[in-house]
Amino acid sequence: MTDNMTMTRRERRVQRLADLVAERKAFEAELAAKKAAIEAEERADVKAVKDALKYAGEARCAAVEELYELFGIEEEVTEKTAKDGTVRRVRKDRDEAKRAARLVEAVVALKARGAATEASLEQAEEPILEDGETVADGGVHEDDDEPEERDDAHERGFSVYGA
């Protein structure tokens, strides 16, 4: 009788171990699938960047240079003296990764400021006219006999590219 009980315990332990091994294999397969998906996504991103460099590199580079100028993000340079005494300027960040990161931070900060401004504008109350209509509803105030003239930004010389 003790042999039967011992065998059952052993069988249960073996079964539990087999279940754990099966769970582990399933988990490893799931992780491998996730890893493969992430690697495929990274390969697609790298390919997109390489294609962009190949086909749209000049336009993107010009746009980024314009953004650097607008945000005032200068490249970091140091002056090195050669053995013969000549001084030359050398870029610290040759691939411009740090400079690009500063540009992204500036754009994110600008977007956050814009979102905060947008939220505060949405919270602002519309002025209510005497008859209960708001200005946005199309209510006309007595003093507004003439339509308001608005300046066209392009007539003032506005350009997207800052020129």
Image (cartoon, rainbow, N blue to C red):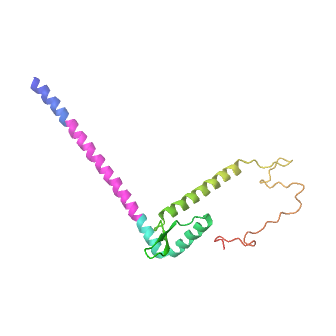
* Residue at figure coordinates x 36%, y 59% from the top left: 39
Q: Is residue 19 magenta?
A: yes
Residue 151 shows in this picture: yes
* Residue at figure coordinates x 21%, y 40% from the top left: 18
Q: Of 43 and 7, which appears nearest the observer?
A: 43
Q: Quarter holding the N terminus?
A: top left
From the viewer's perspective, tell me whether residue 144 is left or right of residue 116.
Answer: right
* Magenta-colored segment: predominant secondary structure: helix
- The quadrant holding residue 163 is bottom right
Q: Which residues are drawn in magenta?
A: 15-44
- The quadrant holding residue 64 is bottom right
Residue 161 in picture, x, y percent from top left:
63, 71
* Residue at figure coordinates x 33%, y 54% from the top left: 33
From the viewer's perspective, tell me whether residue 45 is left or right of residue 22.
Answer: right
Residue 48 in picture, x, y percent from top left:
44, 68
From the viewer's perspective, tell me whether residue 45 is left or right of residue 111.
Answer: left
Residue 119 in picture, x, y percent from top left:
66, 50
* Residue at figure coordinates x 61%, y 64% from the top left: 72
From the viewer's perspective, tell me whether residue 127 is left or right of residue 75.
Answer: right
Residue 55 in picture, x, y percent from top left:
47, 76
